[in-house]
């Protein structure tokens, strides 16, 4: 609806001026001559539909949901037709639509309403959400007629030799959940998946099959492409070829848009994909499912920063669809849904869990330390070596390393101060320095010496370098090593700092603070020379590995699935996960550990290098993530942190954040924490906390304050984020 002219800024008032003399007034459409258009404009004070005149020449094509071009504030911009009406509440004359980009109705009414609800929840704009929901148009893919196989929408045939609900038989509530899906009901469940070879993807595929059998569609959202591939294979096995589509960012614009159109046109009723798939336009939606909702990949990086779990919950509530939140662990947010009785738990019997879970041993047990006194300082104590050797006798073993790279963090060997870049900041347009021309010897062990440039003197295992001074204009980025024969490089500016010297003590020797995955793979390759070593991480993610003996070194989230399961696993450097300054550090550590341990064979051995007295390690030992999640939720409720409350953050320059706080009309009961500095650039962050029932009022207040700043063209941007993952 267009607001009155008194509330519109000058540029928006000009939008509804009649056409210039000489061009001729367009003839209105014979019926419903007014189109309400969502204009692609991110300004929050203009986040509303605008009325445009529909010319008679566009009467047949300017239907709700199509893309149009309109004149807004003197410029041609994109937009979507939301609806056609007979009259406009605007008193003046309306500007006509410039043209209809395509007759394809890409914005359905259900997705338009969902986008509006997401924008309101996260204090964002409809235009920002629609950019996430509707992929860019690809004219050739839109014009290409579908093949006969793609237009066939017959129900899937039963898969020979495949029991329909086998994956859910181990859960007491599983069969009733599938029965509710087949009968068109809308159960909402938080599913604690069992570890083992059956896997989660088959159970999700059976839930989708039950939904389709009931005549409805399904949307499945997973964290990354590796999980999409697993779910895609299981859906193909259960539903048959061509009965669903997989949507990922790496498909390319044409193929992704072609698959998205198949969903829009009703040619398929099931979709699996990453976080962008939450807006897939599935007709007659009956089930929304999300796997591993604690993964930070489910949080959108673009404004208004929605989380896939929250968007799917909104969609399930608005459409009356069922919802399934699955994972090997349980997040505090999912536990909150159970506590509020919005969802019910699906959990296997305790005896079943014990029969399928691996045997977990902490390397820090007192009895183990008594046998191996050197284990206190060793990165791989004897318990871990025994597990690796015994596991390799019967198949592949998994080694999880929290950090990627070779040696991503270095420190002074003498005073332990973090090693920082002493080079001046890179000038604009200057290329980063190349690696030093002379080779540097690889130094075994954790205490690493600095590699040097010319004039280096090598003595034993220590390398000495010429000193270099760090002036006040130094880069100060963290130093790391890319390999055993490379010089220290700055992880910020990318240049080599071969002549580094500690500014605190004057020392020139370096030691490793954190050992990355590539360095770990190198060390294990030396320890087991006859065993192949496979790595999975940033440089390349493996989806599966064969059942042959091998050492698989992977970073969290990149662990490949082994045929028949891993024979053993070692979870390295627990302190690196638990020591992060993050509200969710313990929850995230347990999630990463269980995701890796769940890939093992039943009863296989897992060694975690962590203190057995920690509650999170105890939860892994007992394979009891539910109790840990309930304790986590209780502690957050006591301290006043999400999800027990709703919280928003304001991040920007100190003056801008304080000014926005002064101008925001916060709801009753709101508490302001901060602002406090967040970086060396002078930015600050303030947190605003309200009870759970005040979340909508808080979002509306922050959006109004953002609109005021945008209307007066405030120079400094303040980022508004509602319920962010990186709260602390």
Image (spheres, helix red, strand yellow):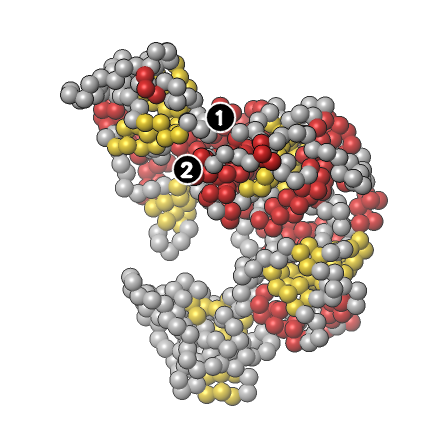
Q: In this view, does 116 lie to the left or right of 335?
A: left
Q: Residue at x 40, y 30 (%)?
A: 102
Q: Residue at x 50, y 42 (%)?
A: 256
Residue 436 seen: yes
For residue 70, the mark is none
Residue 301, given in percent of the width and then of the height, sits at 46, 44
Residue 21, given in percent of the width and then of the height, sits at 15, 20
Local crowd size for mark 1, using a 10 Å CA cut-off: few (<14), some (14–19), many (≥20): some
Along the line of sight, the residue nearer the viewer: 567 or 335: 567
Local crowd size for mark 2, using a 10 Å CA cut-off: few (<14), some (14–19), many (≥20): few
Residue wearing tag 2? 139
Along the line of sight, the residue nearer the viewer: 282 or 709: 282
Q: Earlier in the sequence, mark 1 or mark 2?
A: 1
Residue 138, given in percent of the width and then of the height, sits at 43, 39
Which quadrant would the N terminus be assigned to in this image? top left
Query: How many labels, in total?
Result: 2
SS at badge 2: helix
Residue 627 seen: no
Q: Which residue is drawn at 36% across and 41% down?
A: 718
Residue wearing tag 1? 108
Q: Residue at x 28, y 38 (%)?
A: 714
Q: Is residue 363 left or right of residue 252?
A: right
Q: In this view, does 620 lie above or below 50?
A: below
Report the residue that reaches farthest toward the front: 148
């Amino acid at each position: 609806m267009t607001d009155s002219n008194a509330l519109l800024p000058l540029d928006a008032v000009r939008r509804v001026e009649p056409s210039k003399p000489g061009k001729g007034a367009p003839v209105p459409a014979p019926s419903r001559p007014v189109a309400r258009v969502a204009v692609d404009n991110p300004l929050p004070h203009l986040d509303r539909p605008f009325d445009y005149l529909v010319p008679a020449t566009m009467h047949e094509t300017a239907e709700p949901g199509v893309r149009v071009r309109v004149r807004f504030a003197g410029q041609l911009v994109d937009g979507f037709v939301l609806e056609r009406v007979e009259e406009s509440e605007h008193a003046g004359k309306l500007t006509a639509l410039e043209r209809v980009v395509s007759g394809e109705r890409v914005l359905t009414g259900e997705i338009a309403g969902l986008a509006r609800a997401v924008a309101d929840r996260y204090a964002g704009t409809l235009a920002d959400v629609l950019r996430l929901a509707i992929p860019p148009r690809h004219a050739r893919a839109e014009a290409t007629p579908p093949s006969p196989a793609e237009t066939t929408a017959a129900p899937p045939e039963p898969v020979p030799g495949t029991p329909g609900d086998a994956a859910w038989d181990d859960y007491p509530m599983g069969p009733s959940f599938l029965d509710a899906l087949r009968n068109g009901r809308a159960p909402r469940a938080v599913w604690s998946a069992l570890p083992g070879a059956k896997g989660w993807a088959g159970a999700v595929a059976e839930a989708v099959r039950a939904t389709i059998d009931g005549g409805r569609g399904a949307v499945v959202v997973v964290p990354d492409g590796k999980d999409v591939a697993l779910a895609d294979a299981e859906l193909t096995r259960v539903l048959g070829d061509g009965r669903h589509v997989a949507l990922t960012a790496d498909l390319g614009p044409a193929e992704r848009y072609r698959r998205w159109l198949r969903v829009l046109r009703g040619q398929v009723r099931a979709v699996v994909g990453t976080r962008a798939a939450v807006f897939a336009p599935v007709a007659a939606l009956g089930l929304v499912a999300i796997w591993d909702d604690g993964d930070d990949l489910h949080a959108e990086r673009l404004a208004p920063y929605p989380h896939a779990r929250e968007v799917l919950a909104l969609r399930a509530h608005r459409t009356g669809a069922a919802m399934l939140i699955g994972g090997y662990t349980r997040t505090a947010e999912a536990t909150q849904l159970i506590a509020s009785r919005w969802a019910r738990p699906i959990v296997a019997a305790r005896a079943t869990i014990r029969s399928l879970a691996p045997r977990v041993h902490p390397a820090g047990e007192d009895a183990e330390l008594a046998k191996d006194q050197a284990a206190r300082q060793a990165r791989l104590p004897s318990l871990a070596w025994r597990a690796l050797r015994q596991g390799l006798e019967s198949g592949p073993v998994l080694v999880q390393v929290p950090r990627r790279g070779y040696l991503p963090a270095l420190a002074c060997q003498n005073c332990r101060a973090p090693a920082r870049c002493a080079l001046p900041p890179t000038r604009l347009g200057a290329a980063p320095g190349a690696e030093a021309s002379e080779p540097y010897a690889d130094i075994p062990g954790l205490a690493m010496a600095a590699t040097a440039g010319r004039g280096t003197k090598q003595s034993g295992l220590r390398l000495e370098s010429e000193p270099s001074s760090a002036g006040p204009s130094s880069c100060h980025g963290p130093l790391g090593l890319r390999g055993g024969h490379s010089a220290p490089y700055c992880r910020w500016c990318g240049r080599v700092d071969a002549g580094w010297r500690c500014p605190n003590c004057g020392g020139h020797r370096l030691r490793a603070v954190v050992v990355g995955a590539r360095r770990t793979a190198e060390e294990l390759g030396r320890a087991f020379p006859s065993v192949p070593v496979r790595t999975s991480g940033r440089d390349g993610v493996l989806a599966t590995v064969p059942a042959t003996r091998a050492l698989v070194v992977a970073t969290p989230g990149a662990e490949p699935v082994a045929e028949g399961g891993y024979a053993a696993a070692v979870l390295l450097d627990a302190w690196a996960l638990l020591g992060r300054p993050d509200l969710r550090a313990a929850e995230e550590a347990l999630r990463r550990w269980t995701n890796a341990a769940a890939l093992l064979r039943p009863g296989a051995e897992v060694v975690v290098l962590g203190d057995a007295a920690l509650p999170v390690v105890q939860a892994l030992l007992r394979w009891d993530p539910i109790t840990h999640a309930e304790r986590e939720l209780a502690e957050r409720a006591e301290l006043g942190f999400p999800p027990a409350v709703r919280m928003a953050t304001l991040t920007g320059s100190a003056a801008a954040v304080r000014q926005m706080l002064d101008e925001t009309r916060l709801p009753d009961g709101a508490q302001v924490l901060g602002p406090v500095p967040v970086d060396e650039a002078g930015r600050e962050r303030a947190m605003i906390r309200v009870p759970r029932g005040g979340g909508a009022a808080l979002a509306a207040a922050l959006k109004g304050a953002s609109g005021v700043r945008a209307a007066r063209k405030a120079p400094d941007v303040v980022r508004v984020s509602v319920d962010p993952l990186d709260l602390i």
